[in-house]
Image: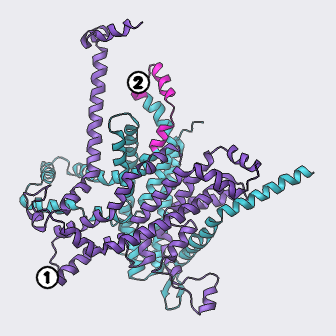
């Protein structure tokens, strides 16, 4: 009897201590996440006009959503474009970061330096810098100067290939991917770290055993390396999508439009509705991809 | 015994190759080709990452005449540091730098402190509704701040806790354009990417053997004491990682600072306004009407601004590279 009571008090004591530890999160979540989320959801169904001491709200139903999707001149177009680039970019990011992680995990001269360079984008590609980088690329100014004097090599090459008349569309897709490699590399620092940490946990004895059995490098890559890091594929995929959706650089037309509507037009209701549409799309995409990937993920215990 | 390897080495490559039936040549050349290809790929990608930085450095040292000179490509003909002086003036660099360092440091410390507590709580204690609260952490990670920014904006504009301030002052507080929203949000784990740090720290603490704390408990150490004296010292590498990320991401962030701080003098904000400032400055000093600044000149100044504001970060990265990369992958965090 006494023992039973002791167990219960221990558990309740643990519960209290646990709650004390996560108390900051609970307060923050309720005040700065749940409340604003609920409020923003409410806003999205209302017309909000800010006043001097507060704001007045009038319920307008789904009018904001309707306007965002059919009335706004830019929003739907931006949204569709955004989803398109997200799909291609995420795929490219995943493949590229995986390949780079495999390379960085091998032993070669200057590996430390190469690693340091590859993670540099993690600190440089965030926030305002990335936006300035892509928007006002310095190279652009150089290429305008170069264009005037007619010595733009890549431009000329592009023109020649375009004019040669074979599959203009196919070429433009290729150019797009090549032009996008820089953006993709800049966005894949964290993914490389995650893959790399996964690769480092694979024990070398597995490769040795496979080697003994006459397995080639190529085969052991697909039979050992790939399945072992496949759980991280899921994590990275979700991270990439979130990262892409949250990137507040100047290329992201949707977020620009949202903050423009909020800060310039002071239309809180419409901007809230737009954010919720955007968030809904993000959640749906994350759900779909994690459903697909989790089917093929292999968990090694 | 010592003779055998010597004679084996003494044989020429071709002889050994012949004995192995051509296998040695094939495998050696295959390895060489793979190495060369890898080196090319690595060099190309590294160059691509470093090139914008290098070209910014060279362009920032050029005088305005050199930008238009098509024969000047990498090395400036008339090197000058005037661009740095001008950019520093346009960005009010010293003030912005001090403010940014201060804010990034304070928020990063608060964020890491709060997230460590929470991460530890999630990793070690069992309490009712734990799964639900952890789902909330995941929610924090995936909700873009833009979704709640609208109402956070309004929230801090008319800030009030249960109508207390309203009762005392007759009106709610206006916390916009102050540092308070930052501090409040960092202290309560709602700052920039805090969900991610909680997740990382929880994963780390879950991997630490429980016997360490049990020993401390047996010796009569309390929960908080155990956490501070036993767990924290071991967690220093991962804490450093989190701190560095928090610091750097706060440094370059523009979304939060624009939403909460308005027009405060921070490096990121100044950087985004630099183009506007430049044309204003040109109009003021040269009495020219309209936009007299060429695109190339504008790019040069922006590039210099980017260099100047990332310079401290790059220095930090060079010194703390291990903290950023190695500790994160060495702790074996399975995200």
Q: x and y percent of residue B153 in the render?
A: 49, 78
> What chain is colored cyan?
A
> Which residue is the site of mark 1?
B286
Image colour for chain B is: purple
Seen at 21% across and 78% down, the residue is B279
- Say if residue B269 shows up in the picture: no
Looking at this view, is B212 or B267 the one in front?
A: B212
Crowd rating for badge 2 (residues with CA inside 10 Å; few <14, some 14–19, many 20+): few
Inter-mark Cα distance, 1 to 2 = 70 Å
Which SS does the magenta portion mostly show? helix
Q: x and y percent of residue A157 in the render?
A: 14, 49
Seen at 72% across and 54% down, the residue is B126
- Observer-side mark, 1 or 2, equals 1
Q: Above or below — where is A24 with respect to B260?
A: above
Where disc 1 sits, the SS reads helix
Q: Give the range drawn in magenta.
A: A195-219
> Which residue is the site of mark 2?
A216
């Amino acid at each position: 009897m006494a023992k039973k009571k002791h167990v219960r008090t221990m558990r309740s004591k643990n519960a209290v201590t646990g709650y004390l530890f996560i108390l900051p999160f609970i307060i923050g979540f309720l005040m700065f996440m749940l409340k604003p989320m609920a409020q923003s959801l409410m806003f999205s169904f209302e017309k909000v006009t800010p006043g001097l001491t507060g704001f007045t709200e009038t319920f307008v139903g789904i009018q904001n959503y309707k306007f965002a999707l059919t009335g706004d001149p830019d929003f739907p177009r931006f949204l569709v474009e955004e989803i398109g680039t997200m799909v291609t970019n995420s795929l490219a990011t995943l493949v590229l970061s995986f390949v780079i992680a495999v390379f960085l995990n091998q032993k070669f001269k200057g590996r430390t330096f190469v690693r340091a360079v590859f993670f540099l984008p993690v600190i440089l590609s965030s926030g305002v810098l990335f936006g300035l980088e892509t928007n006002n690329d310095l190279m652009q100014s150089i290429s305008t100067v170069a264009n005037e004097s007619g010595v733009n090599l890549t431009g000329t090459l592009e023109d020649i290939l375009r004019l040669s008349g074979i599959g203009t569309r196919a070429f433009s897709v290729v150019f797009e991917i090549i032009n996008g490699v820089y953006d993709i590399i800049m966005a894949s620092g964290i993914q490389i770290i995650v893959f790399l940490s996964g690769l480092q946990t694979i024990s070398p004895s597995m490769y040795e055993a496979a080697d003994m059995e006459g397995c080639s490098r190529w085969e052991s890559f697909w039979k050992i390396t790939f399945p072992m890091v496949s759980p991280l594929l899921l994590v990275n995929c979700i991270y990439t999508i979130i990262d892409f959706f949250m990137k507040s650089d100047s290329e992201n037309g949707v977020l620009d439009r949202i903050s423009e509507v909020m800060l310039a037009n002071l239309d809180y209701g419409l901007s809230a509705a737009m954010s919720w549409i955007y968030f809904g799309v993000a959640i749906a995409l994350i759900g779909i991809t994690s459903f697909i990937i989790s089917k093929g993920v292999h968990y090694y215990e | 015994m010592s003779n055998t390897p010597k004679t084996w080495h003494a044989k020429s490559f071709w002889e050994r190759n012949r004995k192995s039936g051509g296998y040695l040549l094939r495998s050696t050349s295959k390895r060489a080709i793979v190495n060369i290809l890898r080196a090319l790929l690595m060099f190309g990608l590294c160059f691509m990452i470093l090139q914008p930085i290098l070209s910014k450095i060279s362009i920032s040292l050029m005088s305005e005449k050199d930008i238009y000179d098509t024969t000047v490509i990498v090395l400036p003909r008339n090197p000058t540091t005037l661009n740095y002086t001008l950019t520093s003036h346009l960005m009010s660099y010293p003030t912005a730098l001090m403010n940014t360092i201060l804010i990034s440091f304070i928020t990063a410390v608060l964020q890491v402190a709060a997230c460590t507590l929470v991460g530890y709580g999630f990793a070690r204690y069992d309490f009712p509704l734990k799964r639900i609260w952890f789902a909330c952490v995941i929610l924090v990670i995936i909700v873009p701040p833009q979704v709640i920014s609208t109402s956070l904006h309004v929230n801090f504009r008319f800030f009030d806790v249960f109508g207390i301030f309203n009762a005392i002052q007759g009106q709610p507080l206006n916390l916009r354009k102050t540092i308070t929203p930052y501090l409040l949000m960092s202290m309560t784990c709602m700052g920039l990417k805090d969900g991610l740090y909680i997740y990382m720290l929880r994963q780390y603490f879950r991997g630490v053997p429980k016997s360490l704390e049990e020993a401390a408990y047996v010796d009569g150490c309390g929960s908080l004491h155990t956490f501070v004296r036993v767990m924290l010292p071991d967690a220093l590498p991962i804490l450093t990682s989190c701190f560095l990320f928090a610091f750097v991401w706060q440094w370059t962030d523009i979304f939060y600072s624009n939403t909460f701080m308005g027009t405060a003098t921070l490096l990121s904000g100044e950087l985004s306004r630099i183009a506007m400032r430049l044309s204003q400055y040109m109009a003021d000093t040269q009495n020219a009407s309209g936009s007299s600044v060429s695109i190339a000149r504008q790019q040069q100044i922006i590039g210099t601004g980017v260099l100047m504001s990332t310079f401290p970060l790059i220095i930090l990265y060079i010194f703390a590279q291990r903290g950023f990369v190695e500790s994160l992958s060495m702790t074996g965090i399975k995200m």
